[in-house]
Amino acid sequence: MSTEAPTLTKKDFQTDQEVRWCPGCGDYAILSAVQQVFPELGIPREQFVVVSGIGCSSRFPYYMNTFGFHSIHGRAPAVATGLKIARPDLEVWIATGDGDAMSIGGNHLIHVLRRNVGVKILMFNNRIYGLTKGQYSPTSELGKKTKSTPTGSVDYPFNPLALAIGAGATFIARSVDIYQQHLKETLRRAARHKGTAFIEIYQNCNIFNDKAFAYMTEKEHRDDGTLYLEHGKPMVFGKSHDKGIRMKGTEMEVIELGSGLSADDCLIWDETLDNPATAFLVSQLLPPRFPTPIGVIRSVDAEPYESLVSHQIEAEIERKGAGKLDELIRSGDIWTVHENHTVTN
């Protein structure tokens, strides 16, 4: 007799742990969005795993009523990769921050992206180190004054979307903590992707870097400062939809619609282009010259890493048989260390 899986709700993914972020932190909004989307995916709760590194964002596993790992600084992608290879049936999500992912974890991040491991990466970007109380991070803007850069940072910041494109990521998106409907739809899109999904989430740290994204999140700036990417639709923005983005040679430019120009002159957004050149150009749309693009930057199909590994294992088992661990350990070059400290092979 078959039994239907129970219908899950947001409450099923909440834990009894006190959520301990600073009052007003954008992490609360991200947590709420994830807890609302997970029940919609039709996946049993015991198949979810949330993996994190170190940082404010990395408390995430404690607040999700799923399996989880709070791993070490920057190494969440490595832990998640091992887990996904061993258990491809699990739904593995990574919660990380701009410091955890782009600094000490940079090498791990680019390799999980290039391998196309079937994990979902939520990178909370507040352009600051929050847990260690306000040092500049790899995404902090040039000239940023912090406790560790009192006269202003001279580091050029990472562009997370451009980095992901350069690493060959097959799904790349950006959303904002307070844009709840947009964030939830972006999470749904990521969940459906078969391969690595990388989402940069602009997240406000109201204690150490308040209003870092005010140029696009404040009511008076939102319409002109945000470009919503929609597949198959022209790249139009502005309160009155009176501005657009078009190609000018090998670059993009902002145009004013009207006086002979219309949406037909704007670039039609295509997130499925195999060539990442256009996606890279969109990643370079930066304020104040351009509105900030949010939505899916790239979504292309490629076989996930864990499937390729599984195919190799299955092929070798068929060719050589299942094998035995003891025989494997004792095969090849082995040495015996005797009590008198001599070694024979």
Image (cartoon, grey):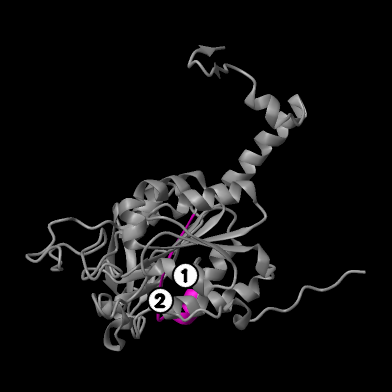
Q: Are marks 2 and 1 in contact (CB under 8 Å)?
A: yes
Q: Amino acid at mark 1?
A: Phe
Residue under the point 25% across and 61% down: 137
For badge 2, the amino acid type reads Asp
Q: In the figure, is residue 132 to the left or right of 343? A: left
Local crowd size for mark 1, using a 10 Å CA cut-off: few (<14), some (14–19), many (≥20) = many
Q: From the top left corner, tell me how far across and down residue 102 is, in percent.
A: 33, 55
Residue lying farthest bottom? 219
Q: Nearer the viewer, residue 43 or 231?
A: 43
Residue under label 1, please give it: 60
Q: Residues within 10 Å of mark 2 (few under 14, many from 20)?
A: many
Say which label, 2 or 1, has the lower sequence index: 2
Label 2 sits on residue = 27
Element type where label 1 sits in the image: helix
Q: Is residue 215 magenta?
A: no
> Is 176 left or right of 310, judged from the image as shown?
left
Q: Which residues are magenta?
A: 171-183
Q: Is residue 181 left or right of residue 331?
A: left
> How many discs appear?
2
Quarter of the image for residue 111 reads: top left
Q: Residue furthest right?
A: 1
- Which is closer to the viewer, label 2 or label 1? 1
Residue 128 position in % (x across, y down): 26, 67
**Residue 233 visible in this rendered orientation of the protein:** no
Vertical comparison of 97 with 315: above or below:
below
Q: Residue at x 56, y 78 (%)?
A: 15
At horizontal 60% and vertical 81% (from top left) the residue drawn is 10
> Dividing the image into 4 quarters, which one contains the N terminus?
bottom right
